């Protein structure tokens, strides 16, 4: 008779979604792993191997320190378009990439979007673009004060990234138009922001080890600064 048994999982440096245990199948005195385990960082998907009564991930996670993803965006026009989505003008082909649900898959998506002129990154429940200096910014979800108001000054707030697709997309406004973007299609979820023309570096923290996107504290998803 086939039965199931729950065994602890030895993650081998991987960050696994869900509890640190999994079901295995018992048949004729043998144990067989049959539930797929997926690393939230590197995207490895495997049923694991049973060793000494535990289910082991077969190889160590190659990204145990997580991923900080840095990209650059040219803004020669001095205007950026901020949105939760700039599809179909900008999109990426996910064939051959790690699962998007993993930190590696998200980093690969960020790089692919940057290569065609769009800064992109996950923000979970939404975020805001704030100015922190003459040519520096953060994409952040600020902590709320005792009155339910964001602790970051309203005078530094430039744009809202809505949570419809759980990501931000930012492009040079003229570049977006040159690829077929139609200003008539923009709505209240899209914002055009004036910035100093130049090259901007986006340092994305979403894939870093220990990053908590749903923290009650201020969450900074990305630092943005003009570097040229």
Image (tube, grey):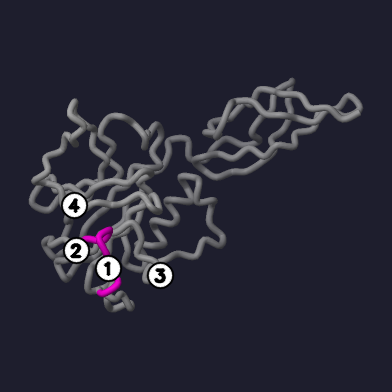
Report the front residue among 39 and 64: 39
Q: Read off the residue under disc 1.
A: 186
Q: Is residue 68 left or right of residue 17?
A: left
Q: CA distance from mark 1 to mark 3?
A: 13 Å
Mark 1 and mark 2 residues within 8 Å of each other at the beta carbon: yes
**Which residue appears at 22% of the width and 69% of the height?**
173
Q: CA distance from mark 1 to mark 4?
A: 26 Å
Considering only order in the chain, which callout, 3 or 1, is on the residue closer to the N terminus? Answer: 3
- Secondary structure beneath label 4: strand
Q: Read off the residue under disc 4.
A: 225
Mark 4 and mark 3 residues within 8 Å of each other at the beta carbon: no
Residue 15, x across and y down, in percent: 52, 33
Considering only order in the chain, which callout, 3 or 2, is on the residue closer to the N terminus? Answer: 3
Q: Read off the residue under disc 3.
A: 88
Crowd class of label 4 (few under 14; some 14 to 19; many from 20; radius 10 Å): many
Considering only order in the chain, which callout, 4 or 1, is on the residue closer to the N terminus? Answer: 1
Q: CA distance from mark 1 to mark 2?
A: 10 Å
Q: Is residue 153 left or right of residue 115?
A: left
Residue 31, x across and y down, in percent: 81, 28
Image: 204 above or below 178: above
Q: Read off the residue under disc 2.
A: 192
Q: Look at discs 1 and 4 and give the one toward the viewer.
A: 1
Magenta highlight range: 184-192
Report the front residue among 144 and 101: 144
């Amino acid at each position: 008779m086939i039965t199931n048994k729950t065994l602890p999982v030895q993650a081998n440096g991987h960050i696994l979604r869900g509890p640190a245990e999994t079901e295995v199948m018992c048949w004729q005195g043998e144990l067989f792993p049959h539930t797929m385990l997926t690393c939230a960082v590197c995207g490895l998907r495997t049923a694991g191997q049973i060793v000494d009564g535990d289910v082991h991930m077969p190889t160590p996670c190659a990204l145990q320190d997580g991923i900080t993803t840095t990209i650059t965006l040219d803004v020669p026009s001095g205007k950026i378009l901020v949105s939760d989505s700039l599809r179909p003008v900008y999109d990426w082909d996910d064939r051959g990439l790690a699962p998007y649900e993993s930190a590696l898959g998200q980093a690969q998506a960020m790089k692919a979007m940057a290569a065609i002129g769009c800064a992109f990154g996950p923000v979970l429940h939404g975020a805001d673009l704030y100015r922190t200096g003459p040519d520096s910014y953060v994409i952040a979800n600020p902590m709320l004060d005792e009155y339910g108001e964001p602790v970051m000054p309203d005078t530094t707030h430039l744009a809202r990234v809505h949570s419809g697709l759980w990501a931000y997309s930012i492009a040079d406004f003229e570049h977006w138009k040159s690829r077929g973007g139609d200003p008539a299609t923009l709505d209240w979820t899209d914002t055009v922001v004036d910035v100093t023309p130049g090259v901007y570096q986006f340092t994305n923290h979403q894939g870093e080890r220990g990053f908590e996107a749903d923290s009650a504290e201020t969450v900074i998803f990305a630092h943005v600064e003009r570097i040229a």
